[in-house]
């Protein structure tokens, strides 16, 4: 009995362009669906309690961290599915800089599986991916936060709104800036449509949270547009 065309195509692709682990770069077994090998999957570290009651940074004893005590926040709460280290860093780089969209969808599924660890987030009315500026979107070809939100929304039965929150400024990369400069860099960077968000409970979705400056600026825009509540959920949290 002959092999069907789809299976033959898959075997040929595996032979010519074998999929590699996003972290250790070893070839993945044929038919392996995860972007990480079995050993590197174990390197994904969940964010364990106690964490800051608002921003979710670990090791805060369940109280507010110093930054959250000092500043009033538009974003009520930030949580993450994993720590930003080792395999999670490589996984984010794979879908953010190396075009592996399937890795972002997998990471969104991981966020869905970790959802139960954060009951304090409640159940939002809508998921909103943090938007890219149109120039960066054209360069990358997709918004990785949208892919995360789509996978999470499909698994959790939550609607995703991919319009209404826009990035107006093509800001400098945040990783190179300190906290004060990050806030200055993002001032006025986002705008939200009041006709879409009034009275809604919104959950922002992003790939990584470092200081939370981008999420906070998005939340301010959504609050000004009349959102009743804004929280955030990221795939990874930097210490």
Image (cartoon, rainbow, N blue to C red):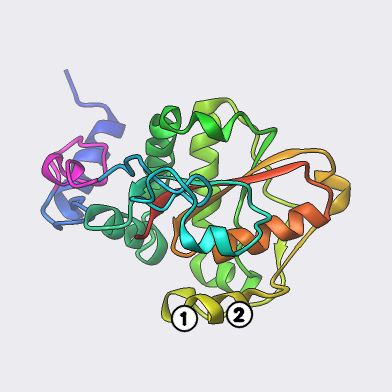
- The furthest residue to the top: 1
Instruction: Examine the image and state in which quarter residue 150 appears.
Output: top right
**Please, what secondary structure does the residue beneath circle 2 have?**
helix
Left or right placement of residue 107 versus residue 37 in this view? right
Secondary structure of the magenta portion, mostly? loop
**Please, what secondary structure does the residue beneath circle 1 have?**
loop
- The furthest residue to the right: 195
**Disc 1 packing (10 Å; few <14; some 14–19; many ≥20):** few
Instruction: Examine the image and state in which quarter residue 48 appears.
Output: top left
Q: Nearer the viewer, residue 234 or 54?
A: 54
| Residue found at x 41% / y 36% | 109
Q: Nearer the viewer, residue 155 or 20?
A: 155
Q: Which residues are magenta?
A: 28-44
The quadrant of the picture occupied by the N terminus is top left
In whole angstroms, how far apart are the C-alphas of marks 2 and 1? 9 Å
Query: Residue 185 bears which disc, if any?
Result: 2
Q: Which residue is mark 1?
A: 177
31 within the magenta span: yes
| Residue found at x 66% / y 64% | 217
Left or right placement of residue 224 versus residue 78 in this view? right
Residue 131 at x, y = what percent?
62, 60
Q: Is residue 101 visible?
A: no
| Residue found at x 68% / y 42% | 202
Could you tell me if the residues under marks 2 and 1 are in contact, i.e. CB atoms within 8 Å?
Answer: yes
| Residue found at x 26% / y 37% | 33
């Amino acid at each position: 009995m002959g092999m069907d065309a789809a299976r033959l195509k898959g075997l040929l692709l595996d032979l010519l362009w074998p999929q590699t682990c996003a972290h250790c770069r070893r070839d993945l077994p044929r038919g392996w669906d995860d972007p990480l090998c079995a050993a590197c999957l174990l390197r994904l570290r969940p964010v364990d309690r106690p964490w800051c009651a608002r921003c979710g940074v670990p090791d805060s004893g369940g109280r507010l961290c110093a930054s959250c005590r000092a500043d009033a926040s538009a974003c009520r709460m930030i949580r993450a599915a994993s720590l930003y280290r080792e395999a999670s860093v490589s996984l984010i780089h794979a879908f953010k800089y190396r075009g592996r969209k399937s890795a972002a969808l997998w990471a969104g599924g991981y966020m869905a599986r970790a959802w139960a660890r954060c009951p304090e987030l409640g159940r939002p009315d809508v998921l909103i991916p943090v938007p890219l500026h149109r120039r960066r979107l054209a360069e990358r070809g997709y918004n990785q936060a949208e892919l995360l939100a789509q996978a999470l929304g499909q698994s959790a039965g939550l609607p995703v709104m991919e319009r209404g929150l826009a990035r107006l400024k093509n800001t400098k990369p945040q990783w190179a800036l300190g906290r004060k400069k990050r806030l200055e860099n993002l001032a006025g960077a986002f705008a939200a449509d009041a006709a879409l968000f009034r009275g809604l409970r919104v959950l922002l979705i992003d790939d990584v949270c470092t200081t939370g400056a981008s999420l906070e600026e998005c939340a301010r825009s959504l609050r000004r547009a009349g959102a009743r509540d804004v929280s955030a959920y990221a795939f990874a949290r930097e210490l």
